[in-house]
Amino acid sequence: MTNGQTESTVALHDLKELARRDLAFSAALLATRSTQEAAKLAAASHIFVTPEALWRNRGTFMAGGMPTWRG
């Protein structure tokens, strides 16, 4: 695993944890319409994840397979 992959894995974990514990953030994440929008939302909370990493892991952040962004 490269350093970039490790950073991405940590960021995705942090994003999942924030969504789990912060209902307002969770609602905002569910309302995003694209991975770019979700990445900007994450960055505002000091979690830096690429839109590509979000796309690869779409549907794994919350119960029920949400969020999923259109292709």
Image (cartoon, rainbow, N blue to C red):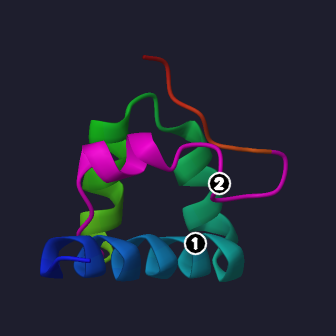
Amino acid type indicated by mark 2: Thr
- Which span of residues is magenta-colored? 47-64
Viewed as shown, does residue 24 lie left or right of 11? right
Residue in front for this viewpoint, 32 or 53:
53
* In the image, residue 63 lies in the stretch drawn in magenta: yes
Tell me which secondary structure the magenta stretch mostly adopts: loop
Determine which of the numbered discs, if any, sits on residue 16 in the image: 1
Q: Is residue 68 above or below residue 70?
A: below
User: What is the distance, in whole Å, between disc 2 and disc 1 at their CAs?
Assistant: 8 Å
Say which residue label 2 marks.
Answer: 60
Q: Is residue 62 above or below residue 22?
A: above
Q: Is residue 58 above or below residue 8?
A: above
Whether pointer 2 and pointer 1 mark residues with C-beta atoms closer than 8 Å, the reply is: yes
> How many neighbours does mark 2 have within 10 angstroms: few (below 14), some (14-19), or many (20 or more)?
some
Residue plotted at (62% across, 42% down): 67
Viewed as shown, does residue 5 lie left or right of 14? left
